[in-house]
Amino acid sequence: MDLGIKGRKAIVCAASKGLGRGCAEALAAEGVELTICARTSDVLEATAAEIRKATGAKVTAVACDVTTDAGRKALLAACPNPDILINNAGGPPPGDFKNFSLDDWRKAVEGNMVSPIALIHATVYGMMDRGFGRILNITSYSVKSPIATLELSNGARAGLTGAVSALSRRTVARNVTINGLLPGPFDTDRLRGTSTKLAEVKGVSFDSIHDARKKEVPAGRFGTTQEFGATAAFLCSVYAGYITGQNVVMDGGSFNSTM
Ligand code: NAP
């Protein structure tokens, strides 16, 4: 299925690995011109080269921290008028509410709420003027179902979701949609990293922790970055112009709810 976005320009944040990379690969396969970022330059450049080789797409790599003003400025300088914006960044660290300082809260809100809002603010009006735009915020299923140790993440991501929910109902009249894509457990470095830490704390093997986490998912497995990227690409397609203000959970059935 041709998604109708060949030749469009996309900024995909935090895309050298994991879910961001999955989105970048899927968009590139549709003929979208990419500007991608991550902090670690050599890994980012290697990813950009692999995507170019696999798809023939034009890929510009901007090594930067997207949670900083300077990082976002560099990204927007490389792609001032994107048609597609995929907001993504690393998540705040886990911990105990009791031990979180106000500074921890400020960092979480800055990284996972203010930064994506800043990129939306910088790009959404141009999209509306041009009559096409797709904005996708990669958040987490914790927006719908809070995770005990991830209160910094629960709060900041829910804040972003609330902040754009009314805006998304205004932009859609100009063919600009804003949606959230909410991952449950996906097989990425981040997931493997948290399993490694948990195994160390409990003094058991990585496999025992990782397999137990897998069994908790009704699908009996973790999601793949290809599945995530394909869903993101569809939400950025011409066919998704009637979907806005939605928060699509991708979690193998983990979130237990009738609707
Ligand atoms: P990942 O595999 O660790 O990849 C993270 C990517 O983001 C890397 O390319 C990393 O590169 C980049 N990055 C991180 N912080 C950045 C920053 N400040 N500026 C620019 N690039 C940055 O992680 P993931 O699993 O794809 O997770 C992506 C997001 O989804 C995270 O916010 C995570 O909390 C959330 N999430 C993931 C899952 C899951 O199961 N995987 C579930 C729920 C929510 P550099 O380190 O080089 O910058």
Image: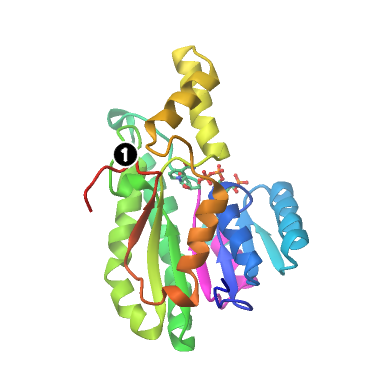
Expressed as whole percent of the image width and height from the top left, the position of residue 19 reads 54, 50
Task: Please say whether residue 4 is one of the residues in the magenta stretch.
Answer: no
Tell me if 259 is positioned left or right of 59 in this view: left
Q: Residues within 10 Å of mark 1 (few under 14, many from 20)?
A: many
Expressed as whole percent of the image width and height from the top left, the position of residue 115 reads 45, 59
Residue 36 seen from this side: yes
Residue at the far left: name it: 258
Q: In which quarter of the image is residue 4?
A: bottom right
Residue at the far top: name it: 203
Residue 140 drawn above or below residue 33: above
Q: Residue at x 58, y 70 (%)?
A: 10
Residue 67 seen from this side: no
Q: Nearer the viewer, residue 152 or 174?
A: 174
Q: Is mark 1 within 8 Å of ligand 1?
A: no
Residue 129 drawn above or below residue 253: below
The three-letter amino acid code for the residue at tag 1 is: Glu
Task: Please say whether residue 83 is one of the residues in the magenta stretch.
Answer: yes
Q: In the picture, which quadrant includes the N terminus?
A: bottom right
Name the residue beneath numbered marker 1. Answer: 151
Q: What stretch is highlighted in magenta?
A: 71-89
**Which element is circle 1 on?**
helix
Q: Which residue is drawn at 44% across and 40% down?
A: 185
Residue 140 drawn above or below residue 148: below
Expressed as whole percent of the image width and height from the top left, the position of residue 238 reads 48, 77
